[in-house]
């Protein structure tokens, strides 16, 4: 039993392999948080202290007792308006305009298996792999009920949390703010690690102290965003990659989110993860409910590396779904950086012919194949094949590609519409806009109101018409702007961003069910919607529109803290690089792209013979190591933001096979030697370097390291394959 309830002291204990999470229903029915961290025994309620604290008020039912205040006690689901002045997980506006909700324990149930969330992505598990705890809390005056869900995947060190808010009263209330997880730390000093960024430079690592006052990150864009990823780490001050305590919070949602971290007046730390409260006012009439998307918690006492591997495993085995979740992904060549909008059917077939020669499995026809779309100002929404441009039907094109033994993939952007499109001319009201105002344009396109069923149905039909035209085996689902003009004909305004996201998930669910053999890759101007919510439907996501190998080292480093290599699409592109103008060798571009789901994004017709041979060799190498890269354990061996080299490795589960990757980042006269220390090997096993035949003990490789060569070139890259003798 990973979940237990002690009836005498009303304590819930959630145990995973290496962690304990404890909470208690107090004498007043309030659900207090006791502990989360290294596995412990016994009851942790002795940690609770009671003092009379000035200006921290007391609940009326405590009589004259002044030593107990919601403002001080650690809680599972703190609510605004009942004496806790810190950041809250829930804000309810009642029918009379008051903002308060006094939640008290009603009952609970413990079940085998993991709960699921209707219409929302969530961690899934087999019946025997997980347990669920549901705790019901209620405000007796307003009859607002909150059901807290806890899912425990014991052997994975994963605890999930979600909340369902139900209005059982007759009057309509409004949810003004809702989080799915709150972590209250009674003591200790912590740092917060966040992943900030921008288009074409996503998920930079930032570590900062949690101080008095709030640190808030999030998105108001209707997508999880390039700017902040919905995933944070709370860590002890001395925690490093390999040592120390750290906690992850991963939001399984692709829309606007908010994470708040705050140290309070008594040095206690609270971190909340949930829905963004701006542009959100969710009315609930009698018997209506709102489900707050899930937050996945994990704890490691051995540093960030272990925490990352816990999340990698959880995402690979319990979030990614479908036929491709575990299947090898095809090596593909994509037409975007190859030709942008300037291609025809022959050019696509040319890529397919080269693909056969080079060993590439699939050709992807990116943006520009439909409607009137020779640049990014028109055509979105008109999902009719531009046969004139292609010089043939889509079916014929696919057959020509397939005839070479090459698979075919296609790009779509279903959520969008161009004003210059037949769809917009016919249904201008389908685009999000505020009545009487001109909308904000983004990339000269508008957002279709996917919260509306009729809009989704029409787009779904037109996309299916395309997918039915031939043997399409991959779809790249793009989304190239942020939401604005939040207003809907159908819903109360404060519901729109949430309902929009539910609409996208509904569309994706139908698509994956109808086409289970199609691999869908998520994308939003690269990594603008790189989150666990999308990964539930699309097992890989285009990591960034930035394909520069040097920048990608940093982007992929940040991404790797939560997301495994099998989720990161990564391609070799042409030089000088289209985003940075930098020229980096084909060898280095190959090694960097092999840290993810591999492919090319360049005109193979422009490769010379020598380059073609190198590409062939890269693909051979990738395919040789595909199992290790897709399913192996991932180790960060340096920090490319501050070290002179970037290094990472993939290690097989039995620790017998290793692929070490390294790129030297700095080049100076009379260069010092870089030594890379490996991780995750068997100490007393002997490993052979397959290329040189040299043998090393695992202990030596881990504690003394291996020297990287000095070469008179910029950014040289190395791939060293080690195998246990
Ligand atoms: C986005 C994607 C690119 C490409 C273009 C096409 O920017 O991230 O990879 O598909 O759209 O317009």
Image (tube, rainbow, N blue to C red):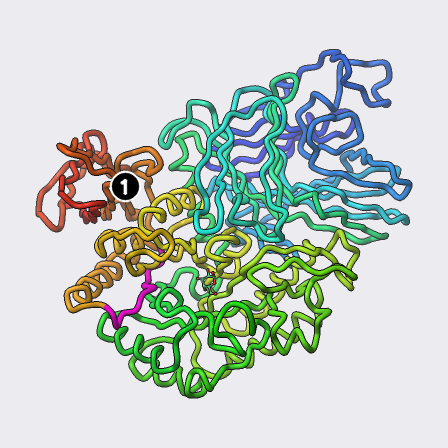
| Residue 684 in view here | no
CA neighbours of label 1 inside 10 A, class few (<14), some (14 to 19), many (20+): many
Secondary element at tag 1: strand
From the viewer's perspective, is residue 385 above or below residue 557?
A: below
Does 42 appear above or below 162?
above
State left or right for residue 147 relative to residue 4.
Answer: right
Q: Which residue is depicted at the point 39% across and 31% down? A: 302
Residue 269 shown in magenta: no
Residue at 31% x, 51% y is 549
- For the residue pair 292 and 9, the one nearer the viewer reads as 292
Is the residue 587 above or below the residue 411 in the image?
above
Which residues fall within the magenta stretch?
595-606
Q: Residue at the location (23% across, 48% down)?
A: 657
Foreground residue, 641 or 193?
A: 641
Q: Position of residue 87 (x, y in %)?
A: 68, 31
Q: From the Cβ of disc 1, is ligand 1 less than 8 Å away?
A: no
- Residue that appears at 21% across and 45% down: 714
Q: Nearer the viewer, residue 716 or 43?
A: 716
Image side of residue 31 versus residue 35, left or right = right
Image coordinates for residue 335, horizontal then vertical, percent:
38, 69
Question: Looking at the picture, how far across and down is residue 153, in whole percent?
Answer: 51, 44
Quarter of the figure that contains the N terminus? top right
- Residue 126 in the image, given as x and y percentages of width and height: 52, 54
Query: Which residue matches tag 1?
Result: 647
């Amino acid at each position: 039993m990973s979940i237990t309830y002690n009836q005498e002291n009303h304590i819930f204990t959630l145990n995973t392999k290496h962690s304990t999470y404890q909470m208690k229903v107090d004498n007043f029915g309030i659900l207090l948080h006791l502990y989360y961290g290294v596995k412990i025994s016994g009851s942790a309620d002795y940690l609770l202290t009671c003092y009379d604290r000035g200006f921290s008020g007391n609940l009326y039912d405590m009589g004259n007792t002044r030593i107990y205040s919601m403002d001080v006690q650690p809680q599972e689901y703190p609510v605004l308006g009942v004496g806790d002045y810190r950041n809250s997980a829930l804000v309810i506006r009642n029918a009379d305009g008051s903002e308060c909700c006094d939640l008290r324990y009603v009952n609970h149930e413990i079940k085998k298996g993991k709960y699921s969330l209707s219409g929302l992505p969530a961690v899934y598990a087999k019946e025997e792999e997980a347990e669920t705890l549901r705790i019901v809390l209620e405000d007796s005056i307003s009859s607002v009920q909150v059901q807290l869900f806890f899912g425990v995947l014991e052997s994975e060190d994963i605890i999930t949390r979600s909340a369902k808010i139900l209005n059982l009263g007759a009057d309509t209330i409004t949810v003004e703010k809702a989080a799915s997880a709150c972590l209250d730390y009674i003591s200790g000093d912590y740092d917060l690690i966040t992943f900030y960024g921008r288009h074409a430079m996503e998920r930079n690592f930032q570590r900062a102290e949690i101080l008095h006052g709030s640190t808030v990150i999030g998105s108001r864009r209707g997508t999880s965003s390039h700017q902040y990823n919905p995933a944070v780490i709370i860590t002890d001050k001395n925690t490093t990659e390999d040592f120390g305590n750290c906690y992850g919070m991963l939001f399984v949602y692709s829309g606007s989110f908010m994470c708040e971290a705050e140290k309070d007046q008594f040095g206690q730390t609270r971190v909340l993860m949930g829905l963004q409260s701006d542009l959100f006012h969710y009315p609930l009439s009698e018997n209506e409910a709102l489900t707050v998307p899930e937050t996945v918690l994990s704890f490691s006492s051995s540093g960030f590396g272990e925490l990352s591997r816990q999340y990698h495993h959880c995402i690979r085995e319990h979030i990614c779904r479908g036929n491709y979740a575990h299947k090898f992904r095809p090596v593909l060549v994509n037409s975007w950086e190859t030709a942008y909008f300037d291609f025809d059917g022959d050019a696509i077939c040319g890529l397919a012919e080269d693909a056969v020669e080079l060993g590439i499995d699939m050709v992807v026809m990116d943006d520009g194949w439909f409607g009137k779309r020779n640049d990014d100002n028109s055509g979105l929404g008109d999902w009719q094949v531009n046969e004139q441009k292609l010089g043939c039907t889509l079916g014929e094109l696919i057959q020509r590609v397939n005839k070479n033994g090459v698979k075919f993939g296609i790009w779509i952007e279903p959520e969008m519409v161009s004003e210059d499109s037949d769809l917009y001319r016919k249904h201008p009201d389908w685009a999000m806009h505020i009545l009487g105002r001109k909308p904000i344009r983004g990339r000269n396109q508008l957002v279709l109101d996917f919260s509306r069923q009729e809009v989704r149905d029409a787009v779904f039909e037109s996309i299916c018409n395309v997918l039915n035209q031939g043997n399409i085996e991959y779809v790249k689902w793009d989304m190239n702007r942020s939401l604005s003009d939040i207003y809907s004909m159908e819903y109360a305004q404060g519901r729109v961003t949430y309902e929009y996201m539910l609409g996208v998930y509904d569309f994706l669910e139908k698509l994956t069910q109808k086409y289970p053999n199609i691999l869908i890759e998520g994308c939003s101007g690269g990594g603008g919607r790189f989150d666990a919510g999308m990964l539930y439907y699309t097992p890989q996501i285009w990591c960034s529109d930035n394909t520069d190998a040097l920048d990608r080292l940093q982007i992929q480093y940040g991404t790797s803290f939560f997301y495994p290599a099998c989720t990161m699409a990564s391609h070799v592109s042409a030089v000088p690089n289209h985003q940075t103008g930098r020229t980096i060798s084909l060898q280095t571009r190959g090694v960097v792209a092999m840290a993810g789901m591999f492919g090319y994004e360049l005109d193979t017709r422009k490769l010379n013979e020598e380059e073609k041979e190198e590409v062939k060799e890269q693909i051979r190498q990738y395919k040789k190591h595909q199992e290790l890269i897709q399913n192996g354990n991932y180790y960060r061996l340096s920090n490319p933001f501050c070290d002179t080299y970037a290094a990472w490795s993939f290690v097989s589960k039995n620790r017998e096979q290793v692929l070490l990757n390294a790129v030297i980042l700095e080049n100076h006269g009379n260069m010092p030697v870089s030594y890379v220390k490996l991780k995750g090997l068997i100490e007393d096993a002997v490993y052979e370097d397959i290329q040189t035949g040299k043998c090393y003990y695992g202990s030596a490789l881990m504690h003394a390291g291996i020297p990287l060569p000095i070469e008179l070139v910029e950014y040289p890259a190395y791939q060293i394959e080690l195998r246990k003798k």
